[in-house]
Structures are given as C-alpha cells and as structure tokens.
Image (tube, rainbow, N blue to C red):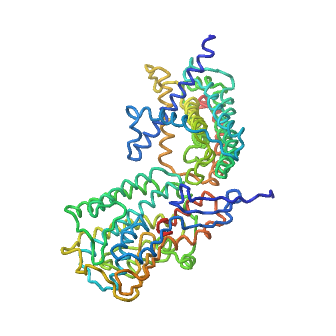
Amino acid sequence: MLRTEEMLLNVGPQHPSTHGVFRLVITIDGETITEAKPVVGYLHRGTEKLAEDLTYTQIVPYTDRMDYLSAMTNNYIVVHAAETLMEVELPERAEFLRVIVMELNRIASHLVWFGTYLLDIGAMSPFLLAFREREQILDLFNDLCGARLTYNYMRIGGVKWDVPEGWLDQVRAFISNMREKLKEYEDLVAGNEIFLNRTRGIGVYSADEAIDYGLSGVNLRAAGVDWDLRRDRPYSVYDRFEFDVPVGKNGDLYDKFTCRMEEIRQSLRIVEQAVDQFPEGPVMAKVPRVIRVPEGEAYVQMESPRGELGCYLVSRGKDKPYRLKFRRPSFYNLQILPRLLKGENVANLVAILGGIDIVLGEVDA
Amino acid sequence: MQAWMWLGPVIMLFVVLGFVTLAILFERKVIGWMQSRIGPNRVGPWGLFQTVADVLKLLLKEDIVPQKADETLFKLAPVIAFVPAFAVVAVLPFTDSLVFADIGVGLLYFIAISSITTIGILAGGWASNNKYALIGAMRSAAQMISYEIPLVMALVGVIMAAGTLNLSGIVEAQKEMWFIVPQFIGFVVFFIASLAELNRTPFDLPEAESELVAGYHVEYSGFRFAFFMLAEYVYVFAMSALTTVLFLGGWNPLFGFTFLPPLIWFLLKFSLIVFTLIWIRATLPRIRVDQLMQLGWKVLLPLALFNIFLSALLKEIPGIGSYY
C-alpha cells in the first residue's frame, strides 16, 4: 500500500457552494473526507440580544433577516409568541392571510432549494427555471406588502396590509401555473440517470439517528419519521385544511428531493383551499397602541420550510421582551453534517451540504 | 505555393479565433434561450462584441503570479495547454482541397497531440500551489487516462472500415454511407469520450465550480486564464470538426444535394455538433468523479472493444460487408 498524506482543506467561508458564509474545515485523503469540522458565526448579528432592547413591533423586521428565504414564517413565530402570552383573539381574515403568505413563502423557499441544489451538483438550467417561478411569488408579495424579501408583514394582532384588488385571482393563476411547472421540473430532473446516481443512497441516516441529532422538517421526514407540526400540533388555522405530509423511506438525498417537491404540491393545495374559503372582515384585532406583553413565559413552535422553528419568550410585563430565544432549524439540522461527511467523497460534500438546506442567516442569527 | 506556406496558417488562426469568439457568444445565447433568458445583448448589435469586450478586459487585467507558485511552470502551463489545441487544427480536412497538412497518419497525429494539453492543465494545477487547483489537475489527469483509451478504441472501427489513417481518405470512404450508421456504437462511445476529453458538462469535473471553485485554473487571471479558455474552445472546434469528418461524412452532401458547396455541408454538420454540445451543457448535471471512472472503464471500453469485434465480423459478411 502506498503511503498517502492527508491534506487539510478549508472550504469557505468564501466558496460558491456553502450557501453563504459557512466554513468547513475538512481533512481529505485523496478525495475521501476523513474529518469535517463546521465553523459557523460569520453572519452572527446577535438578533436575540438586540431584541431585548426593541419593542415587539420593532423586532419583526429583525426576524426577516434570519431565514431570509422564508421571512414570513419568521415574522409569524415572534408575533405568535407575543399573541400567545397576550391571548389575543385574531380576526379570521388575518389568520387566512397569514397561512396563504406562509405557504407561498414555503414554496418560494423550496424553489430556491431546488434550483441551488441542482446548481451544486452541476446542472445550470433548473436554477433559472426555479427562480422564474419564484419571481412570481415575490411579485405577489411585493403587491401585498411592498417588499420582495424582507416583508415585515405581520403585526401582533393581525397583518399590516389587506389584500389589494385582484390579488387572490393572481394567486389562483399562480397555483395552476406552478402545478404545470412542477411537472416540467420533474421531467427535467427526476428521471435523470446522473441525478439519480448522485442522490440515491448518498448521505443516508436512520430515523433514530435523525431524532438523536434533533433534526426537523424535511431532514427528519426523509428518514421516515412522520412528523409535521402543521398537522400534529396545529397552529393558526391549519386544522381547517386538508393536506398530506410526504415522508421518505431511506433518508438519502433523493428522498429529500422528492419530499420537498411533494411539499410544494401540498402547499399549493393549502393555498388553494385558503383562497377558496377566504373570509371577509378586518385584518387587525383590537390591540393597544403600545404593546405590553403580560408577565410570563411561552414557547411556541411551527413548521418552517427548514424544520421546527421555535420561539421562547420571557416577558416581565414591559413593552420589550426580557429574553427572546429562537430555535433555528438550520442550526440544529447542521449538527449532523460532520457525521454524514465522514468517509464521503469530496464531490458528495456539496451534495450532502446542499441536501440539508441551510440558510446562513438563520444558522448564525 | 511559398506564400501559402505562411499565409494559410495565419488565416486559419484568425478563422479559429473568429470561431471561438462566435462560439462563446452562441453558447451563451443558446443556453440563455433554453433557460428563458435573453443572453448577452448589450455590447454591439445582438451582443456580437460581447466576447471581444470580455477578451479585452482579460488582456487589460493585472498579471498576477501567486507568491508561492512555481513561477516558470506557472507561466509555461497555459502555453503547453494552448499550443496543441492549435496544432491539431492543421490536419483537419474541411473540403477535399482545403486542408493544411494532408499527412498519412492524420488521425493518430490528432489524438497524440491533443493529449499534450492535459500536461499543461496538470502543470498549471501543480504550479499554482493551491489545493483546489491540485485536486482539479489530478482529476483531469485521471479523466484523460480513462477516456483517451475508449476514444481511440472507438475509432478503430472507423479506421478498419476506411482502411486509412488519413482524414481525407476517411471522408472519401464515406461517399456511399456515413460511418455514423454502420459504426453507431463507435459513434456513441466516441461522442461521450470526446465530451470527457473536452472537459464539458457532464464531465466538467476538473473545473467543477461548485466543488473546486474553479479547479485547475483557480489561481489564473488575465490573459493566462484567457489562454486556458481559448484552448478549451479551440478543442470544441477541433473535436466537432473531427466528429464531422469521422462519422458524419465530412463535406459529403446528404441525399445527393450537391447544389450546396462542400464547405457549407461541412459547416452545417459541424454546427450541429457544436449545438449538441451546448444543448447537453444546458441540460445535464455533473457526474461524480468515481462514477466517471466506472463509466469509462466498465462501460465505454468494453463497448468499444465489442464494436471492433463486431465491425471485423460484419466486414466478412457479403452484401453489407462493403459498408464496414
């Protein structure tokens, strides 16, 4: 046997496939990874600490910047935490609007994942196709709240803006268009031999391991754990809609792909039902001008596109939180990476990292 | 005759450079259309001067040699990669009269010279003293060994059928029937192997940007980088022309449509191959490095050997034997 020497390779923080400023220190023997050490924190802005000096309304734009691919769900978790403590009764129309925008945002987020993931494993076109459809969602959001990425849309007691005229019809048109395009994506990618070879049986972990590592969202479901907070611990008005939770079998990259594609379909179903049942009425509840959350603690959780997004809020009865803690799914899902990368090929590195679907704004908060 | 000796190559150089300029624009346009974009359209009418502007930008850039690089080798590598790319163009017959060096072993010359480029890539990756560049260069060397062999083996069938290594002779042998029909297996193996030789998608591992940032040329900038890129596109030109000559009957017209001049026929077939290369790039993901080796050794090589056996066998059968 030839004596080989190990090489230390620094992947990132400036590397095209680390999806932001993620750094990974790997030791490689030829092209095989013997050890991988993730280094996070390059995008740390201290959101949780900053929140202690901000009023509740002021915190909302900060949450936009955590998981910037799905700002609506981040908006929701912080207002949801405050509303839980305040016991506000929300108008129906606000709840429906929240569900519609959150599900649309889930679709947009999964589309970004689909595009960048295929880009990671070397296919260029799906990226642009996915962004073409995502653009329609961003346009819808732009019409609704005047922003394309950082929406700052939700308020304690409801949402900031009511729907503009004709918006719901545009959403309907988007749903039917998106369903067609999904078929196109699957034609292009799902049956491709190279794609299958690169994703089947790669980055496998069992259901037990997934639970041990505290994974959530698609990363958990791909391994075969049937768990979705929208269905199992319903919040907002999710209990009124019918939808399936796609679950994988093998916990490999291909299952993650199929789960996410199916989730887009299910989100479209939810949006369709919500648009059909859309009620009349106000979009804001009667809340005081200066919001003071009564003394107490609350932990709320929800299913963000990346997994269980949680918010732990401690209030001392002031207009600012005493302590705010986010359970950020990307950060928790990332913990399994060193275990997955050990013994893998360098070419699989980007595929496995991409499969976890991290957003660095959320990992570093 | 004397004037042609030096004027011809100079003209050819400009033809090839012109092709490279247009091919890069064409590639960006076609891929743009396939991805519902417009493609470059700002510089000049229809974006025609986009590549010219890009090349000028590269020429104006600061010439950077990394401090810890092997300076001599670092500067030499782009030249080693680039010169063979032009050298192979000499033997390509575009029509029966338009060929610069009508040498007896043209095909062998092409294959042998084109292999030298890999040494340039390997040297560039090594001399850069960069880990990503090194991995890219190593991949390139492994890829060359794995794919040169099936590539040459796939050509044996053509050589057997034509009975010559001279490229003009091979085209002449296709007067009746293009080799793509009797040598179909050979064509498929050759085409896949040539994609790998060209380092193009789905075999663009040496410069896999999502894994190795840019691969072997990660430390190169300015005109040295331009040389690597130029070499790559000249190979696209040469390989497409070679495919046309070997399998698509070169300048021979289809269905006896002789009213089009032979050069036009050649260009049509040639453009079809170039378009196919671009099309593949817009469609397929990248294959993984170990799967690449498996495909080369376990699939393409046996197929190529089988093709030789089949061609030899069919050659002896009366009736269809004349096509082999």
Q: Residue furthest bottom?
A: A295
**Nearer the observer, B323 or A111:** A111
Q: Position of residue A42 (x, y in %)?
A: 53, 64
Q: Please tell me in which quadrant of the rendered image residue B310 appears.
A: top right
Could you tell me if residue A40 is visible in this image?
Answer: yes
Could you tell me if residue B115 is visible in this image?
Answer: no
**Nearer the observer, A363 or B190:** A363
Q: Please tell me in which quadrant of the rendered image residue A289 appears.
A: bottom left
So how many labels did they put on this image? 0
Instruction: Determine whether, in the image, residue A177 is placed left or right of residue A197.
Output: left
Q: Position of residue B123 (x, y in %)?
A: 70, 42
Q: Quadrant of the N terminus of chain A?
A: bottom right
Q: Residue furthest front?
A: A53
**Nearer the observer, A137 or B266:** A137
Q: Position of residue B54 (x, y in %)?
A: 49, 36
Q: Is residue B162 above or below residue A364?
A: above
Instruction: Determine whether, in the image, residue A29 is placed left or right of residue A112.
Output: right
Q: Residue at x 63, y 35 (%)?
A: B314
Q: Is residue B308 above or below residue A243?
A: above
Q: Residue at x 61, y 69 (%)?
A: A338
Q: Position of residue B7 (x, y in %)?
A: 59, 16
